[in-house]
Image: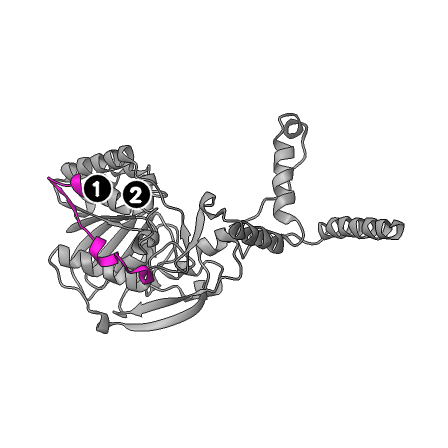
């Protein structure tokens, strides 16, 4: 018994020493697995010590940089899964997908955002189309996802200068139109959204056979990163090539980019930024082969949708209100758009608080 106690003590001390030594190795600033920046070492000062911020920052630093963190986080995630605690997490494993947990219908959020869109449309005296994309969980028929109630309430708020485009028939029962490891729709899902919009406004669109498709494997998206279920297989990204005359500019970069795909992003952690270089405050996609101009008020779903819309418009202007801080009504009045589309995922529309910037 004594020898066993000594062995246990030696192993425990060895473990502590190994962990301590591990902290002297270089610390990464970014976690490729979790796709986020890790906490930096806190700067020591009397003020930070006295107000308690230093100890809090030190704790975050130690948690983020503990040796073997990815292994420990992964083990914890699988233990939680085996113990049936999935529904207290923000990522669910269901129907072969890593899904964002459902967002409950919020009548006050719907009323607030739809009233703002109505005011925006009335200011411009122009029709504003609204297209809200249901979640993958709803598309898979999981009862906890009540997107139908939200979409019905949004549709009931239409009228006047606001037209709501229903896409429930497009995505119901088709979870394959969403990634397994990411909360976005796939390129095919975005194509179906593009087609539904163009049909609703009575305009011509390009058919599926008009595109050449390149497949890129090994995509592990945002829900994969947040789940820590590291053994879950990756997805395949499809890049649909249409017109070869498209160019892209955005407010955060100089110059013009040829094509809608940023191929170098496929070598990075967040491969979804291959579409239009990810999120920017304002993005312009131009197609000299087409005419007409559309303004899209959007979330990241339109990183992929914007490339399809550019197959049918001479210019597509995408505005992300998380980053664009100017009145959008002023932009619309100055540029004179032929069409205006508000396009969000259902969950993002319910949590969006920046639509007031439309005024």
Label 1, on which residue? 154
Q: Which of 158 and 137 lies nearest the eye of the viewer?
A: 137
Total marks drawn?
A: 2
Q: Residue 263 in the image: x percent, y percent? A: 41, 66
Label 2, on which residue? 349
State the image quarter where residue 327 is shown.
Answer: top left
- Residue 173 lies in the magenta-colored region: yes
Q: Residue 286 in the image: x percent, y percent? A: 25, 60
Q: Residue 17 in the image: x percent, y percent? A: 78, 50
Residue under the image location 45 percent in, 49 percent down: 91
Q: Residue 131 in the image: x percent, y percent? A: 22, 49
What separation in Å lies between label 2 and label 1 (alpha carbons)? 10 Å
Query: Are dots 2 and 1 in contact, CB under 8 Å?
Result: yes
Can I make out residue 309 in this image? no
- Residue 319 lies in the magenta-colored region: no
Residue under the image location 12 percent in, 43 percent down: 126
Marker disc for residue 344: none
Can I make out residue 319 in this image? yes
355 to the left or right of 41: left
- Give the residue furthest to the right: 2
Span shown in magenta = 154-177
Mark 2 lies on a secondary structure that is helix
> Is residue 115 placed above or below 258 in the rendered structure?
above
State the image quarter where residue 304 is shown.
Answer: bottom left
State the image quarter where residue 117 is shown.
Answer: top left
């Amino acid at each position: 018994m004594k020898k066993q106690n000594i062995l246990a003590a030696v192993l425990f001390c060895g473990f502590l020493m190994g962990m301590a030594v591990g902290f002297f190795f270089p610390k990464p600033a970014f976690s490729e697995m979790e796709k986020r920046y890790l906490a930096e070492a806190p700067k020591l000062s009397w003020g930070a010590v006295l107000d308690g911020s230093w100890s809090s920052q030190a704790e975050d630093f130690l948690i983020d940089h503990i040796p073997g963190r990815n292994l420990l986080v992964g083990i914890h995630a699988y233990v939680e899964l085996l113990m049936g605690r999935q529904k207290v997490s923000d990522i669910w494993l269901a129907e072969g997908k890593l899904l964002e947990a459902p967002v409950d219908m919020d009548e006050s959020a719907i009323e607030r955002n739809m009233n703002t869109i109505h005011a925006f449309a009335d200011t411009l005296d122009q029709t504003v189309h609204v297209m809200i994309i249901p979640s993958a969980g709803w598309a898979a028929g999981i009862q906890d996802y009540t997107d139908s109630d939200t979409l019905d309430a949004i549709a009931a708020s239409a009228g006047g200068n606001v037209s709501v485009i229903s896409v429930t028939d497009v995505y119901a029962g088709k979870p394959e139109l969403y990634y397994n490891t990411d909360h976005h729709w796939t390129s095919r899902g975005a194509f179906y959204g593009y087609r539904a919009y163009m049909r609703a406004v009575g305009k011509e669109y390009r058919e599926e056979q008009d595109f050449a498709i390149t497949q890129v494997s090994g995509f592990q998206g945002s829900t994969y990163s947040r789940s820590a279920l590291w053994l879950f297989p990756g997805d395949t990204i499809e890049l649909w090539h249409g017109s070869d005359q498209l160019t892209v500019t955005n407010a955060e970069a100089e110059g013009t980019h040829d094509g809608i795909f940023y191929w170098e992003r496929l070598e990075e952690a967040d491969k979804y930024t291959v579409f239009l270089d990810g999120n920017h405050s304002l993005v312009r996609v131009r197609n000299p082969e087409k005419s007409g101009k559309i303004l899209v008020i959007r979330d990241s779903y339109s990183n992929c949708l914007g490339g399809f819309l550019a197959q049918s418009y001479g210019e597509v202007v995408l505005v992300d209100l998380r980053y664009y801080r100017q009145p959008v009504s002023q932009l619309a009045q100055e540029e004179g758009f032929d069409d205006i589309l508000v396009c969000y995922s259902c969950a993002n529309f319910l949590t969006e608080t920046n639509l007031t910037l439309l005024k």
